[in-house]
Amino acid sequence: MRKDELRHEINLRKRQLTREELREQSLLLVNKALSHPRVNAAQTILLYYSMPDEVHTHELIDTLYKQGKTILLPVTLENSLEVRRYEGQKSLKEGRAFHIMEPTGDVFSSLDKIELVIVPGLSFDLKGNRLGRGKGYYDRFLKLVPQAYKLGLCFDFQKVDAVPVEDYDVKMDEIL
């Protein structure tokens, strides 16, 4: 299956679930993430501020932030991601790409300090391959943080046997 076909298939699967069902499944995944050893051990974590059709990460972000961890969120630039500190809900504003809320805090340039990246995706396979939305933002960024443990976060219906892979795609260390 080609990438565009798989994106279409996953989007069809998503539309079969109500927002409430997605919210319930998200809560289970958030609890699973909060008890994950890598999440507990990491002090500096890059997450994503979820869109309505993704695993809802807002509670996860706030919980980890309140635990005193350094929480980073991406800001979408022209062709890349910039990382900024999350400093609470008040520090967010709507971004340019996908209308995702993005932090207005300080730019975080010590990329080598990022221990864990919790990564969104449209689909993941059992080998850790990821299918994103097609812009390549995360693949380009993840190459800048090879030391970070890459944890893909998705609903069960987003897991497939095989994701089409290109040379530039970055594998996840684990899928939750």
Image (cartoon, helix red, strand yellow):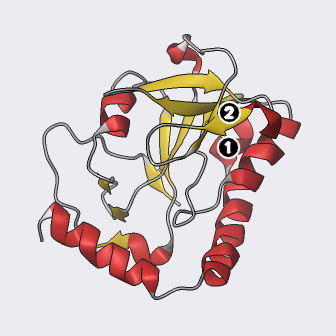
Q: Is residue 79 above or below residue 50?
A: above
Q: Residue at x 47, y 37 (%)?
A: 96
Measured as percent of width and height from the top left, residue 88 is found at 81, 35
Q: How many numbered marks have been drawn onto this rendered protein structure?
A: 2
Q: Which residue is mark 2?
A: 42
Q: Is residue 42 above or below residue 84?
A: below
Q: Is residue 100 left or right of residue 133?
A: right
Q: Residue at x 53, y 62 (%)?
A: 54
Q: Quadrant of residue 163?
A: bottom left
Q: Amino acid at mark 2?
A: Ala
The answer to whether marks 2 and 1 mark residues whose Cβ atoms lie closer than 8 Å is yes
Mark 2 and mark 1: span between their CA atoms?
5 Å
Q: Is residue 1 left or right of residue 93?
A: left
Q: Is residue 62 above or below residue 121?
A: above
**Res. 35 in view:** no
Q: Residue at x 53, y 32 (%)?
A: 74
Q: Which residue is mark 1?
A: 39
Measured as percent of width and height from the top left, residue 64 is found at 78, 42
State the residue lying farthest toward the top: 109
Packing grade of label 2 (10 A; few <14, some 14-19, many >=20) is: some
Work out whether residue 53 or residue 65 is closer to the camera in this orientation and state it.
53
Q: Residue at x 72, y 28 (%)?
A: 43
Q: Is residue 78 above or below residue 58?
A: above
The disc at residue 105 is none
Could you say whether the residue bearing mark 1 is in a helix, strand or loop? helix
